[in-house]
Image (cartoon, grey):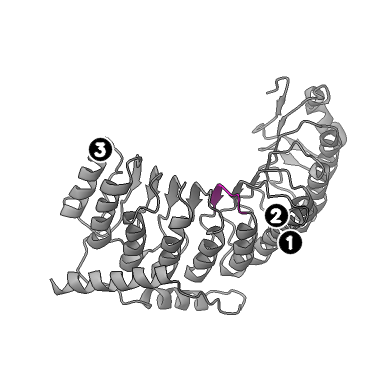
């Protein structure tokens, strides 16, 4: 597909090795001096092919979108650094560039270094997609440090960061890279969208990320689905919610919030932290009726724009009063269809996991895995953390005594 400003061979399944191979498919691109978007994903590109494409990109003075997702399928790991270096070096001076997509390229932590010069020195791009690349903690740290350095260079020049969207899910980032990402987020204070699902990040890492993101007042979209929050990580996110008054989407599904964690999140929402929220995803979080009752109150009083609410897989009967209250609260705002199906809810047995048990269990699991040893991360509790925990304890005692 091509137009006067968009060139695409996306999804054609081409295997392009040599200059001759790739030039056959780039005839239109050669004739597009004003090209703004290039989509190469869904093909497999060799070193010489990437170098040929890079020569063209260097001449594209109006390029806005560079989409190179899924371009290394079947390639040797030894080929990828040269190929990636050619592409990134061609983009390093592009002042027009808005988006770079390198997702679904399983180059792992061994091949991230070619991206560093681009990430450090091109301070014009706004959207960076690096999803499903197998970075690991070491590779994630390299990328985060490069982004942090970029922000510091901008600050030294009296400029603000242009980075607005960061997508880095399914990369096994774990706690080992969390501190570096937290520093990068804090430095790029203009972030609007951050998606980091399925990274094996545990509660200490989640707390660090939340602390870093608290320096991003314009945040509208936060997705940390399928990591591990437990009570302490949930409290850190709850403490961060007032820092994001423009938040529209919050995805905490499959994050093992637990009873107290759910209460902490619901309390922050009940106090009006996120009045612009439109989508709230809390599936399979082990929330019970206490947090769900608080959530109903929050929706009624402070969430008039909530049009998508996902709660399936939590610990309450679909016919419980807390669910009825949530439905009534949504209906008050004309969003009676906002709630997802509740066909996999669990019955709450009235017992609350003691504070620390979830964390201890998660830490035991971590010891059983073949991971590199790292220094323990210490996160200081804030006044908001303590208040949420105290109220969670109080509500838990009241519920159990009744």
Q: How many marks?
A: 3
Classify 112 as above or below 51: below
Residue 68, image x, y percentages: 70, 41
Residue 388 left/right relative to 171: left
Q: 313 or 148, which is in the foreground?
A: 148
Q: Residue at x 40, y 58 (%)?
A: 254
Vertically, is 179 above or below 331? Answer: below
* Dot 3 alpha-carbon crowd within 10 angstroms: few under 14, some 14 to 19, many 20 or more: some
Residue of label 1:
110
Circle 3 sits on which residue?
336
For numbered disc 1, what is the local secondary structure?
helix
Q: Mark 1 or mark 3: which is in front?
A: 3
Label at residue 179: none
Q: Is residue 279 magenta?
A: no
* 49, 342: nearer the viewer: 342
Q: Residue at x 18, y 48 (%)?
A: 324
The magenta span reads 189-195
Residue 137 falls in which quadrant of the image? bottom right
The quadrant the C terminus occupies is bottom left
Residue corresponding to mark 2 = 107
129, above or below 237, in the image: above
- Which quadrant holds the N terminus? top right
- Tell me what residue is drawn at x 54 percent, y 67 percent: 208
From mark 1 to mark 3, how far is it between C-alphas? 49 Å
Q: Nearer the viewer, mark 2 or mark 3?
A: 3
Place of residue 17 in the rendered image (x, y in percent of width and height, measured from the top left): 81, 40
Can you see residue 40? yes
Q: Residue at x 80, y 23 (%)?
A: 32
Q: Do tag 2 and tag 1 residues touch (Cβ < 8 Å)?
A: yes
User: Is 46 left or right of 188, judged from the image as shown?
Assistant: right
Viewer can see residue 320: no
């Amino acid at each position: 597909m091509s137009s006067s400003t968009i060139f695409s061979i996306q999804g054609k399944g081409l295997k392009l090795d040599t200059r001759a191979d790739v030039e056959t498919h780039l005839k239109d691109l050669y004739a597009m001096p004003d090209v703004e978007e290039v989509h190469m994903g869904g093909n497999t590109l060799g070193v010489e092919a990437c170098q040929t494409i890079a020569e063209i990109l260097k001449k594209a003075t109006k390029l806005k979108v560079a989409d190179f997702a899924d371009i290394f399928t079947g390639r040797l790991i030894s080929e990828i650094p040269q190929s990636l270096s050619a592409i990134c070096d061609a983009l390093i001076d592009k002042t027009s560039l808005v988006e770079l997509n390198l997702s679904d390229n399983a180059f792992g932590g061994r091949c991230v270094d070619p991206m560093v010069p681009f990430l450090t020195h091109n301070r014009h791009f706004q959207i960076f997609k690096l999803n499903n690349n197998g970075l690991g903690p070491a590779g994630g740290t390299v990328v985060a440090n490069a982004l942090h350095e970029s922000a510091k260079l901008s600050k030294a020049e009296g400029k603000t960061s242009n980075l607005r969207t960061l997508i880095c899910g399914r990369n096994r980032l774990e706690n080992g890279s969390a501190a570096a990402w937290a520093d990068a987020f804090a430095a790029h204070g203009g972030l609007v969208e951050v998606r980091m699902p399925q990274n094996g990040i545990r509660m200490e890492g989640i707390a660090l990320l939340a602390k870093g993101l608290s320096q991003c007042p314009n945040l509208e979209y936060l997705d940390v689905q399928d990591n591990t929050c437990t009570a302490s990580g949930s409290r850190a996110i709850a403490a961060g919610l007032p820092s994001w008054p423009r938040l529209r989407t919050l995805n905490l599904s499959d994050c093992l919030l637990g009873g107290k964690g759910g209460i902490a999140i619901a309390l922050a929402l009940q106090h009006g932290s996120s009045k612009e929220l439109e989508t709230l995803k809390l599936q399979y979080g082990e929330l019970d009726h206490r947090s769900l009752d608080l959530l109903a109150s929050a929706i009624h009083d402070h969430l008039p724009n909530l049009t998508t609410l996902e709660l399936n897989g939590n610990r309450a009967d679909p016919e419980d009063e807390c669910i009825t209250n949530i439905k009534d609260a949504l209906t008050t705002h004309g969003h009676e269809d906002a709630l997802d199906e509740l066909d996999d809810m669990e019955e709450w047995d009235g017992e609350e996991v003691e504070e620390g048990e979830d964390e201890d269990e998660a830490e035991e699991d971590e010891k059983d895995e073949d991971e590199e040893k790292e220094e323990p991360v210490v996160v200081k509790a804030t006044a908001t953390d303590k208040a949420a925990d105290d109220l969670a304890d109080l509500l838990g005692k009241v519920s159990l005594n009744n």
